[in-house]
Image (tube, rainbow, N blue to C red):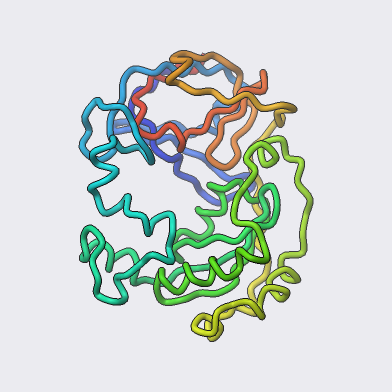
């Protein structure tokens, strides 16, 4: 089987285990179905996810020009507390920013390598947790806009982490935590503006990833340095493919790379 196209974040479907799909322009691959099979991934060219041109990818699948111009790469994407659409104030494109920012957002706790706080749109639950490789997660507040979620995250970062150790996540050296207790412990630190939206009755969500074998010491595949790689797929977690020789490949981190994939 052969596939070709530009890499984008793998699409997922909740299940036991989670189902993963690589979606290309004219085809798709259910990645779960090729576990324990040999894959060859070959870099062909770059293809910016916005302009489509063969230019070096700068960040988030975009070339440098697009990254600094398009509204979907504004600073408020990574730093929700910078959102200003609720003030009717434009960053790059007010219509786009209102559409994304002025909708319900969730502040949550997720445990992938350690307990961390995060923000996502309500419609991205549980996708966001899956993408982070969290084996358990829980909602803290559901607020009406991105700004409120952002200031809540900033306030809670003084008391809990906001980063995932991807190496720990991929080797599965993680410890189960009581996220209900964590949420209650953090409640006094939620900003007053967000406190009315506290979700006291939500339970933990447990997530099961399709992994046959975890790597013992991860080696990251960078297609810019190694344009062709062959290995036996042993697992999928977060947005990573994990191979028998301890190589791991971050699909989302390689967005904008146009590749060929052969399944042997």
Query: Image quadrant of residue 186?
Result: bottom right
Please determine whether, in this image, residue 173 is positioned above or below residue 106: above
Q: How many marks?
A: 0
Q: Is residue 214 left or right of residue 49?
A: right
User: What's the residue at 47%, 67% (across, down)?
Assistant: 150
Instruction: In the displayed orientation, state which residue is furthest to the front.
Output: 158
Q: Residue 81, image x and y in percent?
A: 43, 66
Q: Residue 212, image x and y in percent?
A: 70, 31
Query: Image quadrant of residue 83?
Result: bottom left
User: What's the residue at 63%, 73% (across, down)?
Assistant: 202
Q: Nearer the viewer, residue 155 or 36?
A: 155
Q: Quadrant of the N terminus?
A: top left
Please determine whether, in this image, residue 118 is positioned above or below residue 203: above
Q: Residue 214, image x and y in percent?
A: 71, 31
Q: Is residue 260 left or right of residue 25?
A: right
Query: Image quadrant of residue 38?
Result: top right
User: What's the residue at 39%, 34% (across, down)?
Assistant: 255
User: What's the residue at 59%, 68% (across, down)?
Assistant: 139
Please determine whether, in this image, residue 52 is positioned above or below residue 96: above
Q: Residue 23, image x and y in percent?
A: 38, 36
């Amino acid at each position: 089987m052969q596939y070709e196209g530009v890499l984008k974040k793998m699409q997922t479907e909740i299940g036991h285990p989670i189902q993963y799909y690589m979606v290309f322009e004219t085809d798709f691959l259910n990645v779960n179905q090729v576990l324990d099979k040999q894959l060859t991934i070959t870099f062909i060219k770059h293809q910016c996810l916005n302009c489509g041109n063969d230019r070096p990818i700068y960040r988030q699948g975009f070339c440098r020009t697009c990254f600094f111009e398009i509204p979907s790469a504004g600073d408020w994407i990574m730093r929700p507390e910078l959102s200003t659409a609720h003030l009717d104030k434009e960053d790059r494109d007010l219509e786009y920013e209102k559409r994304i920012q002025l909708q319900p957002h969730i502040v949550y706790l997720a445990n992938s390598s350690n307990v961390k706080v995060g923000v996502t749109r309500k419609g991205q639950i549980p996708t966001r947790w899956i993408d982070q490789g969290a084996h358990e997660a829980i909602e803290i507040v559901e607020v009406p806009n991105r700004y409120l979620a952002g200031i809540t995250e900033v306030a809670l970062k003084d008391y809990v982490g906001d980063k995932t150790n991807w190496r720990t996540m991929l080797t599965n050296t993680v410890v189960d935590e009581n996220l209900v207790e964590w949420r209650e412990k953090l409640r006094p630190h939620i900003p007053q503006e967000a406190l009315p939206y506290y979700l006291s009755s939500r339970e933990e969500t447990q997530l099961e990833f399709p992994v046959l074998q975890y790597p013992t010491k991860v080696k990251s595949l960078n297609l810019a340095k190694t344009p062709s790689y062959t290995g036996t797929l042993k697992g999928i977690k977060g947005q990573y493919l994990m191979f028998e020789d301890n190589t791991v490949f971050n699909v989302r981190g390689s967005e904008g790379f146009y590749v060929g994939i052969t399944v042997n």
